[in-house]
Image: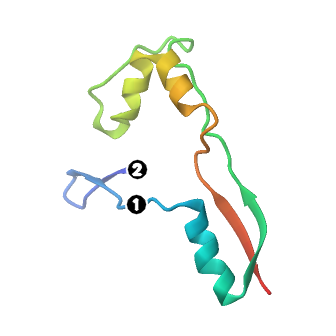
Protein backbone atom coordinates (compact mmCIF):
# COMPACT_ATOMS: atom_id res chain seq x y z
CA UNK A 1 0.00 0.00 0.00
CA UNK A 2 1.40 3.40 -0.89
CA UNK A 3 2.19 5.75 1.98
CA UNK A 4 0.28 9.01 2.25
CA UNK A 5 -0.05 11.88 4.68
CA UNK A 6 -3.40 12.66 6.26
CA UNK A 7 -4.69 16.28 6.23
CA UNK A 8 -3.20 16.82 9.69
CA UNK A 9 0.22 15.53 8.55
CA UNK A 10 0.05 12.14 10.27
CA UNK A 11 1.16 9.07 8.29
CA UNK A 12 -1.62 7.06 6.65
CA UNK A 13 -2.13 4.33 4.09
CA UNK A 14 -4.32 4.05 0.99
CA UNK A 15 -6.60 1.04 1.20
CA UNK A 16 -5.87 -1.56 -1.44
CA UNK A 17 -7.35 -4.94 -2.22
CA UNK A 18 -5.73 -8.04 -3.56
CA UNK A 19 -7.54 -9.95 -6.31
CA UNK A 20 -6.76 -13.10 -8.24
CA UNK A 21 -6.25 -12.79 -12.00
CA UNK A 22 -9.39 -14.88 -12.50
CA UNK A 23 -11.42 -12.40 -10.43
CA UNK A 24 -11.00 -9.79 -13.16
CA UNK A 25 -12.10 -12.21 -15.87
CA UNK A 26 -15.07 -13.44 -13.85
CA UNK A 27 -16.20 -9.82 -13.48
CA UNK A 28 -15.50 -8.68 -17.05
CA UNK A 29 -16.67 -11.53 -19.27
CA UNK A 30 -20.30 -11.81 -18.08
CA UNK A 31 -20.89 -8.09 -18.79
CA UNK A 32 -19.69 -8.36 -22.40
CA UNK A 33 -16.08 -7.25 -22.09
CA UNK A 34 -13.34 -9.07 -23.94
CA UNK A 35 -9.66 -9.04 -23.12
CA UNK A 36 -7.62 -7.11 -25.66
CA UNK A 37 -4.39 -7.17 -23.69
CA UNK A 38 -2.99 -7.79 -20.24
CA UNK A 39 0.38 -6.34 -19.25
CA UNK A 40 2.42 -7.46 -16.25
CA UNK A 41 5.26 -4.96 -15.84
CA UNK A 42 8.07 -5.91 -13.50
CA UNK A 43 8.94 -3.54 -10.68
CA UNK A 44 12.00 -1.36 -11.26
CA UNK A 45 15.08 -2.89 -9.72
CA UNK A 46 17.41 -0.45 -8.04
CA UNK A 47 20.30 -1.81 -6.07
CA UNK A 48 20.81 0.77 -3.33
CA UNK A 49 24.15 -0.75 -2.34
CA UNK A 50 25.45 -0.24 -5.89
CA UNK A 51 24.20 3.36 -5.81
CA UNK A 52 26.18 4.05 -2.66
CA UNK A 53 23.09 4.73 -0.57
CA UNK A 54 23.20 3.33 2.96
CA UNK A 55 20.19 1.26 4.02
CA UNK A 56 17.69 3.32 5.97
CA UNK A 57 14.92 1.71 7.98
CA UNK A 58 13.74 4.80 9.85
CA UNK A 59 12.03 6.70 7.01
CA UNK A 60 8.31 5.94 7.38
CA UNK A 61 7.45 6.62 3.74
CA UNK A 62 9.89 3.93 2.62
CA UNK A 63 9.09 1.30 5.23
CA UNK A 64 8.88 -1.72 4.87
CA UNK A 65 10.38 -1.45 1.37
CA UNK A 66 13.56 0.04 2.78
CA UNK A 67 14.22 -3.26 4.55
CA UNK A 68 15.04 -4.81 1.16
CA UNK A 69 18.28 -2.84 1.10
CA UNK A 70 19.43 -4.74 4.19
CA UNK A 71 19.27 -8.07 2.32
CA UNK A 72 19.42 -7.19 -1.40
CA UNK A 73 20.00 -10.73 -2.66
CA UNK A 74 17.01 -12.04 -0.69
CA UNK A 75 14.85 -9.15 -1.92
CA UNK A 76 15.80 -9.81 -5.55
CA UNK A 77 15.09 -13.53 -5.17
CA UNK A 78 11.70 -12.86 -3.54
CA UNK A 79 10.63 -10.47 -6.32
CA UNK A 80 11.97 -12.52 -9.24
CA UNK A 81 9.26 -13.09 -11.81
CA UNK A 82 6.58 -11.24 -9.82
CA UNK A 83 4.87 -8.40 -11.70
CA UNK A 84 4.44 -5.04 -10.01
CA UNK A 85 0.83 -4.85 -11.23
CA UNK A 86 -1.63 -6.09 -13.81
CA UNK A 87 -2.79 -3.65 -16.47
CA UNK A 88 -5.90 -4.86 -18.29
CA UNK A 89 -7.18 -3.52 -21.61
CA UNK A 90 -10.78 -4.61 -22.04
CA UNK A 91 -13.10 -3.80 -24.93
CA UNK A 92 -16.88 -3.96 -25.05
CA UNK A 93 -17.97 -6.84 -27.33
Do tag 1 and tag 2 residues touch (Cβ < 8 Å)?
Answer: yes
Label 2: how many Cα within 10 Å (few below 14, some 14–19, many 20+): few
What is the secondary structure assignment of the residue under circle 1?
loop
| Depth order, front residue of 71/60 | 71
Q: Between residue 25 and residue 76, name the one nearer to us.
A: 25
Q: Quadrant of the C terminus?
A: bottom right
Give the Cα distance between marks 1 and 2: 9 Å
Label disc, if present, on residue 2 of the rendered structure: 2
Residue 65 picture location, percent across and down: 40, 33
Residue 16 shows which numbered tag? 1
Q: Is residue 64 above or below residue 23?
A: above
* Horizontal and vertical percent position of residue 14: 35, 59
Residue 13 in the figure: left or right of residue 19: left
Q: Is residue 66 above or below residue 93?
A: above
The residue sitting at 60% across, 40% down in the picture is 82
Q: Position of residue 30 (x, y in %)?
A: 65, 86
Apparent side of residue 24 relative to residue 9 in the rendered image (left or right): right
Comparing marks 1 and 2, which lies closer to the viewer?
1
Image location of residue 86, percent across then percent down: 63, 56
Classify mark 2: helix, strand or loop.
loop
Name the residue rendered at 49%, 62% in the picture. 19
Point 43% across, 16% down: residue? 71
Amino acid sequence: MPPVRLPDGRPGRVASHRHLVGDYLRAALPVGLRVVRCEEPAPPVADRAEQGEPPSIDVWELWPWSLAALAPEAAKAAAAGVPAMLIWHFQKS
